[in-house]
Image: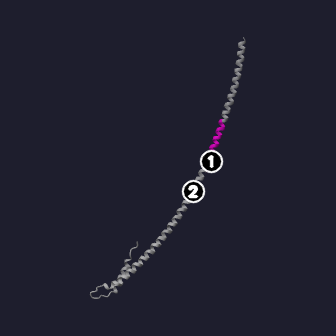
């Protein structure tokens, strides 16, 4: 709250005191009638100035707050865009990594299938060889039994 302008009030008092006429036994009371309206006018003027200053300060404060809100909104929008771009980039990287892992996994599975097929082929070959050996043993057994 603004303080009263004591210099202005002092000037009013000095001006009023020059207009006071002393009447015996009346002391300086005669000038009071002059002083009161001047004080009232000075205080009213100061109150109006103070009210106008408060309105102006309020308007300035509202303008500053509106500007700050706009700046804050712009900053938040920019942060959101950056965050979305970062998330999109991360998603692309993640998808690429998953695709690469899937390719590697498929290649490993294909290699395992080939290895299993090779093992099965080797087992089939061994089974044939065992069958041949068994057949030969059977033939030898028959020949041995015939003697």
Q: Quadrant of residue 144?
A: top right
The quadrant the N terminus occupies is bottom left
Residue 65 position within the rendered picture, expressed as x and y whole percent measured from the top left: 50, 66
- Circle 1 SS class: helix
The disc placed on residue 82 is: 2
Residue beneath the point at 69% across and 28% down = 124
Q: Seen in the image, is 78 located left or right of residue 121?
A: left
* Residue 89 sits above or below residue 25 on the image: above
| Residue 120, percent from left and from top | 67, 30
Q: Residue 38, relative to residue 72: is it above or below?
A: below
Q: Quadrant of residue 4?
A: bottom left
Label 2 environment density (alpha carbons within 10 Å; few <14, some 14–19, many ≥20): few
Of helix, strand and loop, which mostly describes the magenta segment? helix
> Label 1 near label 2: C-beta < 8 Å?
no
Give the camera-side residue of 68 and 129.
68
The C terminus - image quarter: top right
Q: Please report whichever mark, 2 or 1, sits nearer to the chain's N-terminal start.
A: 2
Helix, strand, or loop for circle 2? helix
Q: Which residue is mark 1?
A: 96
> Which span is picked out in magenta?
92-112
Magenta stretch containing residue 20, yes or no?
no
């Amino acid at each position: 709250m603004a303080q009263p302008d004591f210099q202005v009030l002092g000037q009013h008092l000095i001006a009023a005191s020059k207009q006071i006429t002393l009447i015996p036994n009346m002391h300086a009371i005669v000038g009071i009638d002059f002083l009161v309206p001047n004080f009232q006018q000075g205080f009213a003027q100061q109150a109006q100035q103070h009210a106008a200053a408060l309105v102006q300060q309020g308007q300035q404060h509202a303008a500053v707050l509106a500007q700050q809100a706009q700046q804050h909104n712009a900053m938040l929008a920019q942060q959101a865009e950056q965050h979305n771009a970062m998330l999109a980039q991360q998603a692309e990287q993640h998808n690429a990594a998953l695709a690469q892992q899937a390719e590697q996994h498929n290649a490993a599975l294909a290699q395992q299938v080939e290895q299993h097929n090779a093992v099965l082929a080797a087992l089939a070959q061994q089974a044939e060889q065992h069958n041949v050996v068994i057949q030969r043993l059977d033939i030898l057994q028959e020949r041995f039994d015939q003697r």
